[in-house]
Amino acid sequence: MTGRKPYEQALDHLKRKGITPAKAVRGSRMLCLHLDASSDWSTIKRHPDVAAFEKDVRIRALGSSRKRAGGAAPGIRLPRAPGSRQGSLALLPWNIRQAGAPAAWIRTLGGGVRLAVIDTGSGPHPDLSIRGGVNVIGGASYRDDNGHGTHVAGIAAGKGRSGGPPGVAPAVSLYAVKALDADGYGNLSDIIEAIDWCIAKRMHVVNMSFGVPPGYRSKALRGVIRRAGRSGIVLVAAAGNMGRNSGGLDLPAAYPETIAVAASTKKGRIASFSSRGKGLGLTAPGDRIRSAWLNGKYAVESGTSMSCPHVAGGAALLLSAHPGLPPAGAASVLKRWARWLPGYGSRSQGAGLLRLGRIGSVCLPPAKSRLTAVR
């Protein structure tokens, strides 16, 4: 809708007609209705108070189908607090070492930052401490019934308990936003409502390991991403898993307000499945990543879904160490610190491979703090 008043009037009109919208999102002024072939679509489209009229397309999680669950590995122990040297670097997973997180932990573990994972839900899992969340697809629970969301959350914020692999920002305040179902799919309207919730709850970082293939256009999604960026959220999105011939980045990764993330391998190469295209922001580990899974287990997964939370966790570490950074500033710093991978152009790797070690040693100019309490 074009404004709040027309939105409220439309809701009231539908109520008087006995029509209940399938979904109504006040922040985005969005109404979702089931229309049949006899509906007068052209009249609705031409109405002066209708800003956009579009199909509610399906969104998919961007992970692989390899789901090998198992138990914890012995011997991995995290620092108990910033500055602690406890633990052996050699025992940490390769992806955490490649991202440079251990050097950043000397200064911060991500405390004081709120990170939301929009996915299939998260947990419960002994490696995850979830502060809250929401289910926007129906039901009261944000419990994961697929595994993808738990895996993603573990990469960003795993505690490393009981021998499980630690996440990039183990002390971050983690929020689970369930917008995808047990099969890893959801509707565009669910994603918009999920992002709207993150804006309302003043999240600092939002991880989006899902996408719509290149070529799709949505004014509604574009609008809520713009609002999230203006509200001060660092938005991190998976580039896509279509490989060299992807034809571009998935949405929402293609939007300039997001940090679009490609996937690297253990050997520091760009993963073959990682989508290429203009607008890539960074590259992070995404091939054969071990993280939390359903029923307290762990699994190995591949995809830009896995690379994305490395950057989201990295953004949380950066904001924890430098609370005043605006979203564009945080993205700029992470890109400036990235390591360029020889043999690839910017359409394959963005600014280069995520490198978080400088968080532990570099002091940035102070800025006005934006880490406010949740209301």
Image (cartoon, rainbow, N blue to C red):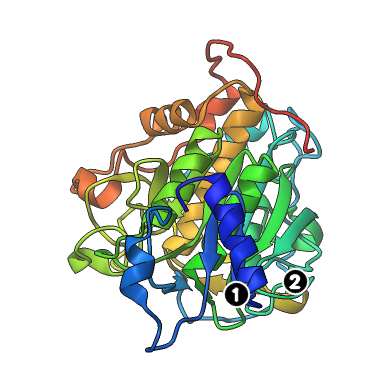
Q: Which residue is denoted by mark 1 in the rendering?
A: 22
Q: Earlier in the sequence, mark 1 or mark 2?
A: 1
Left or right, residue 135 beside residue 4: right
**Quick check: 114 above or below 121?**
above
Q: Quadrant of residue 271?
A: bottom left
- Quarter of the figure with the C terminus: top right
What label sits on residue 210 in the rendered view? none
Q: Which residue corresponds to the image point at 59% horizontal and 49% vertical from the top-left?
A: 27
**Is residue 58 found left or right of 124 in the rendered image?**
left
Can see residue 289? no
With respect to residue 69, does 4 lie above or below?
A: above
SS state under label 2 = loop
Which of the two residues, 141 or 244, is positioned nearer the viewer here? 141
The residue positioned farthest toward the bottom in the image shown? 37
Residue at image coords 37%, 89%: 37
Q: Name the residue carrying label 2.
A: 143
Q: Residues within 10 Å of mark 2 (few under 14, many from 20)?
A: many
Of all residues shown, which one is farthest toward the top?
365
In what element is the residue under mark 1? loop
| Residue 370 place in picture, x, y as percent | 65, 25
Q: Nearer the viewer, residue 243 or 360?
A: 243
Q: Amino acid at mark 2?
A: Arg
Q: Percent position (x, y) of residue 291?
A: 62, 65
Say what amino acid the circle numbered 1 marks: Ala
Q: Quadrant of residue 88?
A: top right
Can residue 295 be seen here? The reply is yes
